[in-house]
Amino acid sequence: MSEKTIIDIHNVSKTYNYMKIRRKEQGPGLWFANIARLKRSKEREVRALNNISFSVEKGEVFAVVGPNGAGKTTLMKILSGIIYPTTGKGNIAHFDIIKGHKKLKEMIAFVSASFWMGLEWQLTAMENILQYATLMGVNNAREKADELIHFFGMESFKNKRVPELSAGMRQLVSIARGFIVERPIIYLDEPFVSIDVEKRKLLSQLIEEKQSEGKTILISSQVFTDLDVFHPRALFLNKGEVVGIGRANELMKENNLIPYEVSIDAFDKETEKVLLNKGIIATPVPDELIQLDNVFTVRLLVRDGMVNNLIKELIKRKIHIFELSKKDLSLKDAYLYRVKNETYH
């Protein structure tokens, strides 16, 4: 572990053992029957993470990306000392993730999309932030809370109780609680969930400010456009497996793929199949096509030198092209090729 490395993880795996509850018995019989079935069984094991290894340097913004069920949240909990890995080892800020988990928690500020469920519902937004700051021993808590309230534009609802808040408002309260605590490492698990475009930009700005202060930041998210602004190195997970580590351009460089965005009046699976079979595009098109006023905006990973073939094929299929533009490689491009594309090969 070098001096620059603050997170160093080796061969970490996490296996859960689930149990189907028996409901035929009642009362004590049900309790004893289920207790007797707690013995670990290979048939009931669920592997959430398998042999994960990576490192993060001090002051880096590092992303953990992948589809639902990829193991992102499980990994973040292990890195926080909340749960232990089944196998593997790691050090964070020179503390062992198992033996030093208590000290490890003192080094980390953690924001999660699910943390709003832990808010005190009888308290207001401001009271929740101040209560958390007090429990975490934050100095000048009121001043720092006011700064965060102002930064995120939360003045209109800071005195409202949690049940009166929208999902986005509750998420902002959770984010403010996380950032009011000064820690060298910040974990953000799906931080962009439920908040609008303006607030996402503000959150990105705050992340950049914290990075400039020397903080190390891990972001777990499926909102790729919000991650691209940081040009981060990323850990790509799929079904608990690592399928790539690096920046978007590094992960795609060897494949000679160029992203193009094309606006057309029609697009279907048959067109996609033809483009794939002819080697014009490298990955299937995501299902979430943008369609406005009978115009599809499609992002395609085109193989180098094949853009003319793309145009010819679309014209041949009588598809009208309104606009075609070359784009920069993004994390989503790498995701489609290194994660989602695994399904097709």
Image (tube, grey):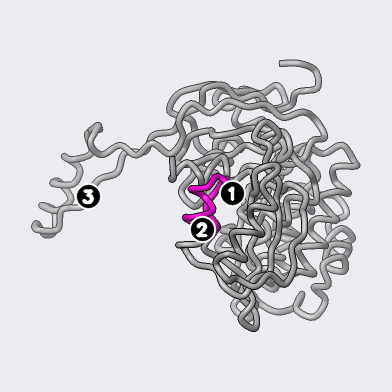
In terms of secondary structure, where does tag 1 sit? loop
Judged by depth in the image, the label closer to the viewer, 3 or 2, is 2
Q: Which residue is mark 1?
A: 281
Is disc 2 surrounded by few (<14), some (14 to 19) or many (20+) residues within 10 Å?
Answer: some
Start-end of magenta stretch: 272-286
Where the C terminus falls, by quadrant? top left
Mark 1 vs 2: CB contact within 8 A: yes
Does residue 259 appear left or right of residue 73 in this picture? right
Q: In the picture, residue 82 is in which quadrant? A: top right
Residue at figure coordinates x 14%, y 58% from the top left: 23
x, y percent for residue 254: 67, 31
Q: Position of residue 311 (x, y in %)?
A: 66, 59
**Where does residue 2 sit, x and y in percent of width and height?**
76, 16
Q: What whole-number distance in Å separates the C-alpha atoms at marks 1 and 2? A: 8 Å
Q: Residue at x 23, y 33 (%)?
A: 41
Residue 142 located left or right of residue 294: right
For residue 272, the mark is 2
Q: Return the mark for residue 20.
A: 3
Image quadrant where residue 46 sits = top left
Q: Residue furthest bottom?
A: 293
Give the amino acid type for the residue marked by disc 3 in the picture: Lys
What label sits on residue 160 in the rendered view?
A: none
